[in-house]
Image (spheres, grey):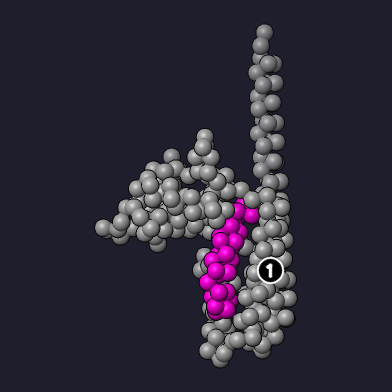
């Protein structure tokens, strides 16, 4: 039997004596599922097994259910009375809506940040995109992808709106559901250059340019994810067609051997 995708990292493994119920346990449930989604260890539509989540998070049934409800509210999990919980699936139309929402929200945060940024914040952003660039160049892809997602959250945090930061986090967490890339697939899309340009526009106080660059960057990412999804669907249909052809050939061979 294949190993559970929730057992592959010790990052969120509960410490000895950790609470098995309550908000702390619920957050561990959320974290192990989000981590598996972000690293493409679970595919859209995959069922979530309560026993696996209990072992991975150290949480009781009540905490698991509450954690799943939080994820369902964020659009990451689908709950069904008959089928239980599963990873959500996003249609191309939902993908467009997610990026539309990100552009509206991030435009507001970027423009605000450009109007209020100080020298300390400028240095922090420049250092951040340099760390991201080094991660990509050195092949540390898991870290690089994490930093690429973190960049947009950092802008919102620095703009000082916790509510919008939370909304952006939920939208970014849904991003892996828009494509079905395998975790070992080499990413074609690297937004570090765009991030650097956005930072320089913010640093110069040009919020309008920063917002435009961010919008172009997000639209390019959207196109990449849609292309990944289309390629995955084509490959899936090809596998199905080959399997059907093989079954048909086997039936014909069997029929030919009958006296």
Q: Is residue 179 magenta?
A: yes
Q: Residue furthest bottom?
A: 119
User: Where the N terminus falls, by quadrant?
Assistant: top left
Q: Residue furthest left?
A: 17
User: Where the C terminus falls, by quadrant?
Assistant: top right
Left or right: 190 as drawn, with respect to 119: right
In the picture, residue 200 is in which quadrant?
Answer: bottom right
Vertical order, 145 against 53 (above or below): below
Compare residues 38 and 208 and report the one nearer the observer: 208
Residue position marked by numbered label 1 in the rendering:
104
The residue shown at (34%, 52%) is 21
Residue 50, image x and y in percent? 42, 43
Residue 244 visible? The answer is yes
Label 1: state its secondary structure: helix
Vertical order, 87 against 96 (above or below): above
The residue shown at (50%, 43%) is 85
Q: Which residues are magenta?
A: 155-181
């Amino acid at each position: 039997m294949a190993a559970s995708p929730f057992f592959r990292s010790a990052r969120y493994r509960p410490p000895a004596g950790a609470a098995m119920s309550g908000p702390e346990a619920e957050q561990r449930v959320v974290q192990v599922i989000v981590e598996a989604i972000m690293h493409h260890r679970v595919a859209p539509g995959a069922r979530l097994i309560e026993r696996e989540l209990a072992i991975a998070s150290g949480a009781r049934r009540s905490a698991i259910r509450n954690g799943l409800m939080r994820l369902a509210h964020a659009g990451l999990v689908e709950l069904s009375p008959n089928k239980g919980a599963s990873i959500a699936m996003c249609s191309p139309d939902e993908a467009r809506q997610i990026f539309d929402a990100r552009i509206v929200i991030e435009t507001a945060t970027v423009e605000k940040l450009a109007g209020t940024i100080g020298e300390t914040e400028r240095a922090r952003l420049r250092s951040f995109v340099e760390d991201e660039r080094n991660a990509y160049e050195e092949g540390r892809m898991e870290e690089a992808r994490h930093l690429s997602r973190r960049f947009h959250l950092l802008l919102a945090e620095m703009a000082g709106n916790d509510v919008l930061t939370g909304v952006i986090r939920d939208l970014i967490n849904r991003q892996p559901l828009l494509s079905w890339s395998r975790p070992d697939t080499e990413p074609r899309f690297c937004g570090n250059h765009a991030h650097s340009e956005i930072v320089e526009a913010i640093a110069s106080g040009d919020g309008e340019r920063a917002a435009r660059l961010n919008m172009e960057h997000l639209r390019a990412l959207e196109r990449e994810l849609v292309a990944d999804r289309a390629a995955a669907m084509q490959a899936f249909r090809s596998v199905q067609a080959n399997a059907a052809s093989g079954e048909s050939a086997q039936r014909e061979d069997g029929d030919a051997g009958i006296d």
